[in-house]
Structures are given as C-alpha cells and as structure tokens.
Amino acid sequence: MFSNRFNALSKECSFAYEILASGVTQIRKANYAKKGIYYQSFISLSVGLERISKLCILLDYYISNNGEFPTDKFLRKLGHNINKLYKKSVEIKEKYDFNFNYLNSLDSEIHKNMINILSDFATRDRYENLNVLVNASQENNPISLWFNLVDVKLFDKHISEKKKQKIVHNADIIHMLTGQFTSVLHSSEDGGLISDVREGSFRTGVYSSVSPYRQLYLAQIVRYWTELLWKLQYKAMAIGKEEIPYFSDMFGCFYNDNSYFRGIRNYEK
C-alpha cells in the first residue's frame, strides 16, 4: 500500500508530464491563422514548467530536512514566476554539484526568450485580450513577443539561405498565380495586416520551417528540469522512507538527445 505522500508525488508528476507533453506538441501547430493554439500551448507550458520546478524545489527541501516537506506558506511564496523558479533550480543544481548529460544551463538567447515569455504569460500576459476590454495595464502581446523573439531568431539561426529564398520564391509564384482572384484577410502574429497571398504564403513558409525548432528548444527546456528531477529523486530515495516514486519512469520521454526529439511530433502518445 502506497503512502499518501507517494500517491501525491506520483499524481503531481504525472500531471506535470501530461500538460508539458501537450504544450510541446501544440506549439508546433500554432500560426497566424490558429492563434488560439498559441494560448493552449502557453497555458500548458507555463503551468507545467511551474509544477516540475516546484517538484524539484520540494525534493531539495526534503533532502535537506531529513525527509520532511515544507509548509503551505513556503510553497505559496514560490509564486508563478518561471524565471525565478529557473534561477532557484540553478541554485539547487550548483548546491549538489550536479553535472547533466545534456544541457547544463538554459542560457542561450532563444531558451532565455522562451522562458521570459512563458514567465510573463504566467504572471500577467495571459489575460491580454480581457485587459484591453477593461482598460487594464497590458505590457506585452505574448504571441507578438514569441514571433519576434523566438520564431524570427530561429529563422535567422537555423534556416539556410537557400531555404529562405525558396520560401520567398514560392510566395511570389503563388501570388502571381492566384493573387488576382484570391481574397486574404488575417492579422499577423505581431499585429500587422495580412491582406495578400504573397504575405500569407511567406508567413506560412516561415511557420513551417521554424515550428520543428520551436518544439526542439522547448523539449530541451523540459529536459533540463527532467534531469534535475531525476538526480534529486535518487538523493531523496536514499533517505529511506520509501515514499519517493520513480519520476524517471514518468518523464522518460524527455530524457533523450536532440536526434530523438527531432523524430517526435506528438509527445502525447
């Protein structure tokens, strides 16, 4: 018979995995014509990263206090700011002198931009549209930030000049063939107007080329916390209370190298 603590930890870990798997899967589908999918992904990712990071913080406390968990006040004080939770995770990693098999930090520009956007979304930007309606303070548009600070950066870094030229060429051809009799009216990710076939085709080409890299970088972020959780798991088990589950079994999908991630489109299977 498993203890209440064991069951609570198992359920929390399972929930964190499932919503992170959903978020990493959905981000590959989001584009200017399906903006709601951005929000589906942002909600899942921000909540999932918060919960896996808090699991790591709780395990650190458990290890440092001979198998005792902190108070509710301690947990609530951690808040929802993913940037701060990441910094706390770095402190824990350094405290135990852990060396990861994969990334030892998330300090690349694109990783940091992703975490910043998700952190702002969790703490203030998730009600962007409602804030406009009620004249509340609204600093950022999360989709616009994602496009400019993630997609554009991925496009510049990872897409070859040959591929970029092909996207432009295809957009010109489609516009030439269909532009005279095709009506297009969309808003872009950064709030501009998409009113012709060329711009719509170009944006679609950009989205199609960068979406696998979005997913790859996010999987790397989840993998960082997965590695930390795994290492803390064994230290917590060593206390001997038999109430720590094998988190490694639940997060196994995210403990893989980049070549494995590139072969996955759906993390929910």
Image: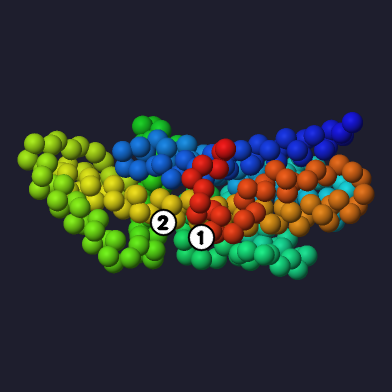
State the quadrant of the C terminus. top right
Asked whether disc 2 touches disc 1, contact meaning CB atoms under 8 Å apart, the reply is no
Asked if residue 25 lies left or right of residue 145, the reply is: right
Callout count: 2
- Residue 9 left/right relative to 116: right
146 or 71, which lies in front?
Answer: 146
Q: Is residue 24 left or right of residue 180?
A: right
Disc with the residue nearer the chain's start (2 vs 1) = 1
Residue holding disc 1: 112
User: Which amino acid is tagged 2?
Assistant: Val
Residue at 71% from the left image edge and 67% from the top image edge: 99
Q: Secondary structure at mark 2?
A: helix
Residue drawn at point x = 33 percent, y = 65 percent:
160
Task: Work out whether 99 lies above or below 44.
Answer: below
Residue at 60 percent across and 47 percent down: it is 49
Q: Residues within 10 Å of mark 2 (few under 14, many from 20)?
A: many
Up-down relation of residue 252 to residue 182 (above or below): below
- On the image, the x and y values in percent for residue 84 come to 61, 55
Q: Which residue bears the numbered disc 2?
A: 150
For mark 1, give the secondary structure.
helix
Q: On the rendered image, what quadrant is the N terminus found in?
A: top right
Residue 233 at x, y percent in the picture: 79, 52
Query: Mark 1 belongs to which amino acid?
Result: Lys
